[in-house]
Amino acid sequence: MLQPNHKNVLWIISDQHRAQALGISGDPNVHTPNLDMLAKTGVQFTDAVSGFPLCCPFRGSMLTGNYPHRVVPGHEYRLPPEQKTIADVFNEHGYDTFYLGKWHLDGFHESEGRAAHHIVPPKRRGHFKKWVGFENNNSQWDCWVHGGEGENAFHERLNGYETDLLTDRMIDYLNEKGEARRQGSCEPFFAVLSVQPPHDPYIAPPEFMERHNRAGVQFRENVPNLAHIRERAGEELSGYYAMIENLDMNIGRILEALRRNDLSFDTHIVFFSDHGDMHGSHGQFRKTSPYEEAVRIPFIISGEQPMGYEHRGCGKVPGVLLNHVDIAPTTLGLCGIPTPDWMAGVDYSHYRLLDNPAHEEPVSAYLQSVVPTMHWDSIDKPWRGVITRDGYKYVCLPDMPWMLYHLKEDPYEQVNLAHNSFYREKLLEVNALLRRWVEKTGDRFDIPEL
C-alpha cells in the first residue's frame, strides 16, 4: 500500500549532541552553517527534550513511540524483537526502509567484549528492509559495520573516520534512489543515518581538531570555576566542537547528494540527537542527568527546498516540548500517515506549516531515569521529572523532591526552589502533575507525599 503523499524521509541522528551546541543556538564555539541553514529553512524545535538522557532508552523510544519503561528501560537492554517500530509502519505503506550506523538496541554488555564486533541478528534489526550498522563502537577511527544475512552477511572495518565513511554509504544509497527515479521508480524511502559523534572520545579529523583548543573554549555560566573541572571540560569541548563541525560538513555533502539526485523537493530531513552532554556544567560530565545540558536536544525538520514549509525563513518554534516518544508519530505525520494506536507519542508535524490548525498538545513533558547506569561524574540514582510549557522543571528522587527550577528566569539552573517554602504551591502543583504522568504512562515510582 503506497502512502498518501509519497514524501521521503531522512533521519540524521548525532549522539550526545546538546541543543546549545549549534551556531544558530548562539554557541560561540562552533560553526555549523549547514545545520543553521536547515533550521532557517525549516522548523527548529528549540524546546525539544530527551525524556531519558541515555543512548539505549532514547533509541528504543524514538523507534517505537513508547516510553522507556515499556520498551528499553536502561543501558544495554534489548529492544524486544517482537516490538513494532516505525519501520513496520513505513514498510506497510510501500516504503523502502534503510538503517545505517549506530544501533545500541541489542542488549550487548560491554563486559562481554567489544560491542563493535557483536553481530545483531537480522530478526533484531527493528524490521528495516535494509540494515548496515553496529551495536556500539566508541572508537571513531576504528569503526566496524555489519549487515546482510546468510551468504550475503558481511562484517567489515571502515577505512577512515566514522562520520565521513557512514556519510559515504548514505550518499551511495541516495545515488541509488536517484538512479531509480531516473528509471521511473516511484518507491519512497525512509532512511536513517545514525553516527556516534560527538560522543566521547572527543576526536575528529586533524583539519577540524586544529580549529579548536582548550584555551579558546568559552564555558557556559554554570561551569564551576574550579581548575580540575575547567581543564577537563576545556580539553573535551575542543574535540567535541571539532566533531560537530565535521558532522555539519558531512550534512552539507548529503544535501548536495539530494540536489544532485533531484530528491530535494520531496525529502524531509529530520535532524536530532539522543541526549546532550554536561561538559562540566554543575560539575558534572556526560549524561543521565536532568540538567538542561543533558536533557535538551537539537531537533530540526527541514529540507533543502520549501516542499510545504510555507514559513520558510521562520525557523525557531519555541514552547513545544517534543519528546523522544513524539519523533516517530511526527515523522509519520510528515508523510500523511496516521499515528498507530500502539504509539504513545504526539504528532507535531503540523508545525512545518505557517498556518497550522489548532491541535491539542501536552503542556508538559515527562522525564525519566528508570534504571541507573552508574555513569561516573553524573547521577547514579533513579529519578523522575517534568518540564512545563510555562518554564518550570521539577525532578524528584524516590519519595523526595530534588529540583525545581524556573527556566525562563534561570536558564542555567543556578537557583533550586524545591526546598524554598515561598514556592510551596508551585511545588505541590508540579508534584501532582508528575504523579499524573507516572499513572498515565503505567510507570512505577515513589512520588513524594508533600
Image (spheres, rainbow, N blue to C red):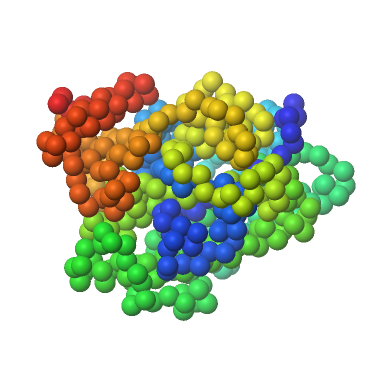
Q: Is residue 34 left or right of residue 296?
A: right
Q: Residue at 22%, 52% (x, y): give it.
A: 414
Q: Residue 293 appears at what percent x and percent y?
A: 34, 53
Along the line of sight, the residue nearer the viewer: 77 or 351:
351
Along the line of sight, the residue nearer the viewer: 45 or 81:
45
Q: Is residue 265 left or right of residue 78?
A: right
User: Does residue 231 sit above or below 126 in this rendering?
Assistant: below
Residue 137 visible:
no
Q: Residue 148 appears at what percent x and percent y?
A: 64, 45
User: Does residue 189 sit above or below 27 in this rendering?
Assistant: above
Q: Is residue 133 left or right of residue 410?
A: right
Q: Residue 96 appears at what percent x and percent y?
A: 70, 39
Residue 340 visible:
yes
Q: Residue at 23%, 66% (x, y): give it.
A: 229
* Quadrant location, the N terminus: top right
Q: Residue 363 appears at what percent x and percent y?
A: 40, 31
Along the line of sight, the residue nearer the viewer: 311 or 32:
311
* Quadrant location, the C terminus: top left
Q: Residue at 26%, 69% (x, y): give it.
A: 230
**The quarter of the displayed image where residue 90 is located:** top right
Q: Residue at 52%, 49% (x, y): give it.
A: 316
Q: Residue furthest right?
A: 183
